């Protein structure tokens, strides 16, 4: 299997696509084709085994081919429950990893794969991550103490929740965290400037761990593969998925799982008040816009980077895709009613999926739960009227001392910190 750029004819191995992150022509790597998976009944205990089977064709012929089993076992060392909320709605809980958000799947898989690629290099790999909250925590946790890899996290000072900030800055060793005096766009600009700078590229071996990397997309297919088979085994029909979407990496992975022949009936893209994706699904016209701040802040994206992958595969929306945009008021109402309606406390992102599920009606939906509500305690607790218990892994992180260095939003200030301290 080779991977090609969405913008041209560049054709590389999986390992090279992982190393590069973005293609030299500025495009994103996608598989050359989607192998068809012969689906049968699936044992629910076998998530890791299903993950290996779903990913094996993409690793065929690559230098990592014989490491896939070890990568899966190391990266996916937490449960992936599919909880039936009633006869026709289930919840796929993707928040049981160390950072309590689904980004653990992609970040941990990428870390496990990259460590196996990197052995033998003299200069460490420096991974620069700009984060609006969740990605940085998952990436820092995944790469912490991995040999031969340094991580530099930039987040906007004062713009993430207190628990998110703690999770970004509680690492040490090979992870350094900077609170940038600016907004998320400043952090992203600094990272882009570093990648474009000769001085930076001479001093460091730079790489990226954001969702443009194919190494974060592929592992996200595995839970759609597994849960669609589990649902079909339990209920005798193929489920549809309702997926909280921002940069559309998670939902693109669901589309890919469907291309492989896993029993995915249809896909609902649930967004917050940021509309470009839903407008494309409704009108066929895609027009990015500046992002709007909402309660579901990990989905505050006006120009989703993975649209390029989606449009490459389907230039127009298909009849099995739908979009629903959810307002902050509807997010609040869904969280407030969650315990009475579904016996669940939802994070604001998952609440978008639950609100969209109510909107589309019908039967046999799997709603995707992307984060644990305790990560967003300041939004969720006033709405449900009681404290939300913190999961053990997140609790352990919150016990650790946190240490971020505050810097002005200038790349030269980061250079100063990394080269002189
Ligand atoms: C990142 C994130 C999303 C959005 O996922 P995309 O792949 O960017 O569409 C949704 N929910 C949570 C909790 C997230 O951290």
Image (spheres, rainbow, N blue to C red):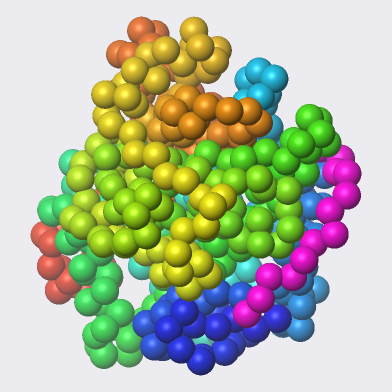
Q: Residue at x 51, y 91 (%)?
A: 10
Q: Residue at x 54, y 62 (%)?
A: 216
Tell me the chief SS of the magenta region.
loop
Residue 388 visible from this viewpoint: yes
Q: Residue at x 67, y 38 (%)?
A: 239
Q: Foreground: 352 or 220? A: 352
Q: Position of residue 291 (x, y in %)?
A: 22, 51
Q: Please, is residue 184 above or below residue 111 in the view?
A: above
Per the rendered image, the range of residues in magenta is 32-45
Q: Foreground: 402 or 69? A: 69
Q: Foreground: 364 or 224? A: 364
In the picture, the quarter occupied by the N terminus is bottom right
Residue 173 visible from this viewpoint: no
Q: Residue at x 80, y 62 (%)?
A: 37
Q: Please, is residue 294 above or below residue 253 in the view?
A: above
Q: Position of residue 106 (x, y in %)?
A: 55, 56
Q: Position of residue 228 (x, y in %)?
A: 71, 43
Counting the numbered discs, the total is 0
Q: Position of residue 399 (x, y in %)?
A: 43, 31
Q: Please, is residue 297 above or below residue 139 in the view?
A: above
In the picture, the quarter occupied by the C terminus is bottom left
Q: Is residue 35 magenta?
A: yes
Q: Is residue 219 left or right of residue 170?
A: right
Q: Is residue 167 magenta?
A: no
The picture quadrant where one finds residue 154 is bottom left
Q: Is residue 292 left or right of residue 65?
A: left
């Amino acid at each position: 299997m080779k991977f090609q750029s969405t913008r041209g004819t560049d054709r590389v191995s999986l390992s090279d696509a992982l190393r590069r992150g973005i293609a030299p022509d500025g495009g994103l790597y996608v598989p050359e084709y989607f192998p068809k998976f012969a689906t049968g009944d699936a044992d629910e205990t076998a998530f890791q085994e299903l993950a290996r089977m779903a990913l094996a064709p993409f690793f065929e012929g690559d230098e990592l081919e014989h490491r896939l089993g070890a990568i899966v076992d190391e990266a996916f060392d937490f449960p992936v429950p599919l909880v039936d909320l009633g006869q026709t709605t289930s919840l796929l809980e993707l928040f049981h990893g160390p950072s309590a958000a689904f980004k653990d799947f992609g970040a941990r898989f990428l870390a496990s794969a990259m460590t196996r690629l990197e052995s033998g290099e003299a200069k460490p790999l420096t991974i620069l991550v700009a984060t609006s909250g969740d990605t940085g925590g998952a990436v820092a946790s995944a790469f912490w103490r991995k040999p031969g890899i340094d991580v530099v996290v930039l987040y906007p000072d004062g713009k993430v929740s207190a628990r998110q900030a703690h999770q970004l800055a509680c690492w040490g060793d090979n992870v350094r965290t900077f609170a940038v005096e600016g907004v998320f766009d400043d952090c992203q600009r600094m990272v882009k400037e570093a990648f474009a700078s000769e001085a930076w590229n001479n001093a460091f071996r730079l790489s990226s761990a954001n969702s443009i990397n194919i190494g974060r997309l592929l592992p996200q297919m595995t839970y759609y593969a597994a849960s669609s088979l589990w649902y079909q085994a339990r209920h005798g029909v193929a489920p549809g998925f309702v997926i909280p979407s921002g940069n559309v990496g998670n939902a693109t992975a669901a589309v890919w799982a469907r291309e492989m022949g896993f029993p995915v009936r249809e896909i609902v893209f649930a967004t917050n008040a940021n509309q470009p994706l839903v407008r494309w699904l409704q009108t066929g016209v895609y027009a990015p816009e500046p992002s709007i701040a909402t309660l579901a802040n990990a989905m505050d994206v006006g120009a989703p980077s993975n649209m390029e992958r989606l449009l490459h595969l389907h230039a127009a929306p298909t009849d099995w895709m739908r979009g629903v945009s959810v307002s902050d008021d509807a997010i609040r109402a869904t969280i407030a009613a969650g315990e009475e309606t579904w016996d669940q406390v939802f994070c604001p992102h998952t609440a978008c999926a639950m609100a969209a599920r109510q909107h589309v009606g019908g039967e046999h939906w799997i709603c995707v739960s992307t984060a644990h509500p305790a990560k967003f305690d300041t939004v969720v607790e006033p709405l449900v009227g009681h404290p939300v218990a913190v999961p053990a892994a997140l609790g352990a992180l919150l016990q650790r001392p946190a240490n971020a260095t505050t810097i002005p939003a200038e790349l030269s200030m980061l250079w100063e910190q990394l080269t002189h301290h």
